[in-house]
Amino acid sequence: MASVTVYGTPLSPAVSRVLACLFEKDVDFKLAPVDMAKGQHKSPDFLKLQPFGQVPAFQDELTTVFESRAICKYICNNYPEKGNQTLMGGRDGDLLAQTSVDQWLEAEGQSFNPPSSALVFQLAFAPMFGFKQDPAAIEQNEAKLANVLDVYDRRLGESKFLAGDDFTLADLAHLPNGHILVSKNEDLFMSRKNVGRWWEEISARPAWKKVVEMQNAPQG
Amino acid sequence: MASVTVYGTPLSPAVSRVLACLFEKDVDFKLAPVDMAKGQHKSPDFLKLQPFGQVPAFQDELTTVFESRAICKYICNNYPEKGNQTLMGGRDGDLLAQTSVDQWLEAEGQSFNPPSSALVFQLAFAPMFGFKQDPAAIEQNEAKLANVLDVYDRRLGESKFLAGDDFTLADLAHLPNGHILVSKNEDLFMSRKNVGRWWEEISARPAWKKVVEMQNAPQG
């Protein structure tokens, strides 16, 4: 029996970020659906796990954690001997490697995530849920994201991955929004040489392919 | 001579977050102004320190770091013996305490920071730089921030600080935007009993008062 539970659906980008980490770390888990249509995410029981009423929430035998990037760090720290050993910048607690991961993971959270999440909403979720698309918001956020990806392209001309020579949480965190955006506007990533090379490599990882399989399976 | 350099102005919220951490840790530093009016933040030399062309950037004898929260973590990790010992959740590397800091620090970055930064721009920087205020944006972001502060108020009814019993980076990260917002709309924080108690305590810390003194001094 898996002692690790992730609350949410793999269709949520933030949930799928945690699932990608669990597959990388080869940590067994079960997925507990949260019926947002019925308001389950605002129920008192769920708010004890996730006070903002959002997915994902994470629970194992030791604790509960929310916020997807904090959950990923916890998984790496609490299961150091399992699966991928370099997601946090190496097994030996090398401070500079870990700082580079922190730095590029925060760049993802603060610079890549806002425009890419806005675009994911406009290009994927708005049509899916019957909201009207906002062309001005699409144009504005594509321009913001293009600036971020230009910085990434220069960085990825100097190093194989964002934080250095290893695939780390800083790369992994881009997979959920990147996957949706590439399916809607491939050029945004693939027209940039180094970003394109990086994207091909990180999106082909077996751990991420398992997440995509979960997303494509009929949702319970 | 200080071997630590912070690039930017204390008037920038992200810079002042790093300064608050340095004062808490009792780490000497010098401040290197970046003349954004002259485009110095987009110069090739500065982009080597901060590839997005933003402030702050941080440099010490060991490395350079960007992104304010990643810089704060680095300062705690690289100067463990100096100043405040519990900013990262305790000195002994307690995983659960550290995870709680990560979790609430990400909540600050993802939930508190977007609406509070938008409000700081509208209420403080727009009038200062001659931009027109957008009443719809003010209303929308005040409502978003109120929801976040409601969650904080419940949390701060259970624990003294956001991550637990100690003042940590998770609290510290709120000081820059909080300071400006309380000066413009005190009720947003002070009308909530536990948030008000927390704000009085964290904003009275000597380290933060030193940052405010730097902000109030004539800027070079």
Image (spheres, coloured by chain):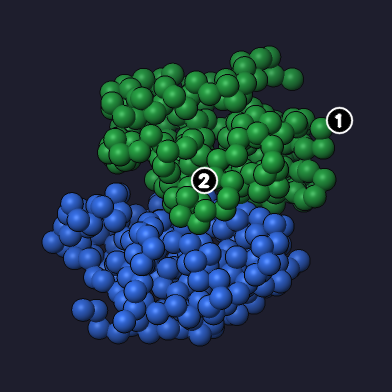
Chain colours: A green, B blue
Looking at the rendering, which quadrant does residue B95 occupy?
bottom right
Q: Position of residue B181 (x, y in %)?
A: 45, 69
Q: Position of residue A52 (x, y in %)?
A: 65, 49
Decide if residue B110 is on the left or right side of residue A52. Answer: left
Q: Do discs 1 and 2 share a chain?
A: yes
Which residue is found at the position 39% from the left and 28% from the top? A198
Query: B67 or A11, which is in the foreground?
Result: B67
Dot 2 amino acid type: Gly
Of all chains, the one bearing label 2 is A
Q: Is residue A100 in sight in this rendering?
A: yes
Decide if residue B116 is on the left or right side of residue A78. Answer: left
Query: A28 or A7, which is in the foreground?
Result: A28
Query: A212 or A144, which is in the foreground?
Result: A212
Dot 1 amino acid type: Met
Q: Calculate the distance from the C-alpha at mark 1 to the C-alpha at mark 2.
A: 30 Å
Q: Position of residue B158 (x, y in %)?
A: 76, 66
Decide if residue A152 is on the left or right side of residue B45. Answer: right
Q: Is residue A140 in sight in this rendering?
A: no
Residue identifier under label 2: A89
The disc label shown at residue A1, or none: 1
Crowd band around label 1 with a 10 angstrom C-alpha radius: few (<14), some (14–19), many (20+)? few
Looking at the rendering, which quadrant does residue B119 occupy?
bottom left
